[in-house]
Image: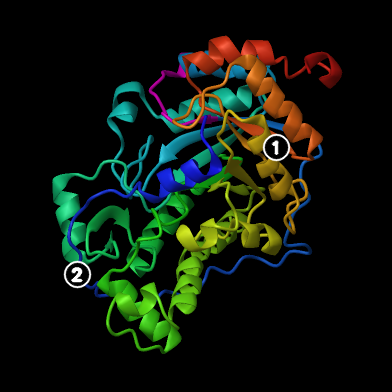
Amino acid sequence: MKSWIATVLLSLVCCLSGVDLSCGAASRLPPPEEPPPVDDARRAPHAVERRGVWDHGGIGRRADEWMQVCRELRRHGITDLFFNALWPDQAHYPSRLVPSTKTSTRYGNQLDHVLQAAHSQGMRLHLWKVCWKPRKLTPARKAALHREGRMQVSADGATLDWLCPSDPRNLQMEKDTLREALRAYALDGIHLDYIRYPDARACYCAGCRRRFGEDTGRRVDPWPAAVLSGPARPAFLAWRRARITRLVRDAQAIARTSGRNIELSAAVYGWYPGVRDTLAQDWGAWLHEGLVDFVCPMTYTEDLAEFSAWVRAHVALPGAGGRVLPGIGVTTTHSTLDAAAARRQIRAARQLGASGFVLFDLDPYLRTEILPLLRLDEPRDAAE
């Protein structure tokens, strides 16, 4: 059982080693994407409870196998499937912008397979988009990004296998891959993950130094000491948050200009507002401003009281009404739940006013040992 403090400490030490960085040639971000005008920035939330499942592995299945999986999910009451299929460097489908995965080469276009299967069962399909964190860079590509100065650097000078959000080229690539997917597939939603920095120690690359100074007019010598503490620290934290929120804002504009009713959501860390400064993930502001249709806080714990405290705090945030789907960690590094424990967390989420929930993760244990026992389509008094 993980405590809140242990969970925070675990996340803050999870940075990855990478390659060296130099200053990128491009420095200024392009103008923000302009969404079409709407009467209300926050669309009305769904009145019917959402019951989602994350498919983290994106494991290869042929079209007939995906059909069977989606039949099972719908039979057990699942309404939304979040399919992990797009990273900054790979996709589980043919793309002109990033290489296709070996899975899609072997088993066929995974996004098309799962989309057709989900829609045949009346389920919504959300493209799970990993932001900034490449899946598996080739040595040649990693070397190229290093030379171009596009990777993150930690406060102690270590290079990380994360793309720097302040680099305009990285931002453009993230947006272009979203546009490509929305044009090619009849998706119901875009689900942003890793929409953050890896931890509080990033990013302090030469590009961030230059762009922070240009954007704020502040003197940033010595670097990074000048922004790690002292008078410039609050301004740097705000600037850092704005780099992450920029992609959220642009993704919303891209979804709105697609010509379809595309929902935008995000998987977020639960200990808000602490993540504003550590990970620059200001998802409370995203809700308040109406930049996302809903968020899925990853409230992974075996402790029902801790889970309930998280959900209670999240649904009370400004703009959160009907837009919080707690993530329930059936099989995660932080928690493992049996069906009875999962039912208790679902019941708590409902009683506290959440608009649904998302289960992690679509694996054999969830399919065979959990979902059949949740009885989600039964009247709530009977199922609970």
Residue designated by label 2 = 22
Quadrant assignment, res 36: bottom right
Q: How crowded is mark 1: few (under 14 residues within 10 Å), some or many (20 or more)?
A: some
- In the image, is 2 to the left or to the right of 358? left
Q: Height in image: 289 above or below 351?
A: below
Measure the C-alpha gap from mark 2 to mark 1. 45 Å
Residue at image point 40% right, 63% down? 171
Q: Is label 1 in a helix, a strand or a loop? A: helix
> Nearest the camera: 221 or 64?
221
Q: Residue 348: percent from the left, percent from the top? A: 74, 31
Q: In this view, does 124 lie above or below 16?
A: above
Query: Residue 186: image x %, image y %?
Result: 57, 39
Magenta segment:
54-64
Q: What residue type is labelled 2?
A: Ser
SS class of the residue under badge 2?
loop
Residue 335 horizontal side relative to residue 324, left or right: left
Question: What residue do we see at 48% from left, 14% from top?
Answer: 364
Dot 1 amino acid type: Ser
How many other residues sit within 10 Å of disc 2, few (<14), some (14-19) or many (≥20)? some
In percent of the image, x 17 and y 58: which residue is there? 144
Q: Dots 2 and 1: beta carbons under 8 Å? A: no
Q: Name the residue under label 1.
A: 308
Name the residue nearer the viewer: 315 or 379: 315
Relative placement, left or right, of 146 versus 1 is left
| Residue 373 showing in the rendered view | yes
Tell me the quadrant of the picture where the C terminus can be found. top right
Q: Quadrant of residue 298 in the image? A: top right
Q: Nearer the viewer, residue 307 or 264?
A: 307
- Is residue 184 visible in the rendered image? The answer is no
First reached walking from the N terminus: tag 2 or tag 1: 2
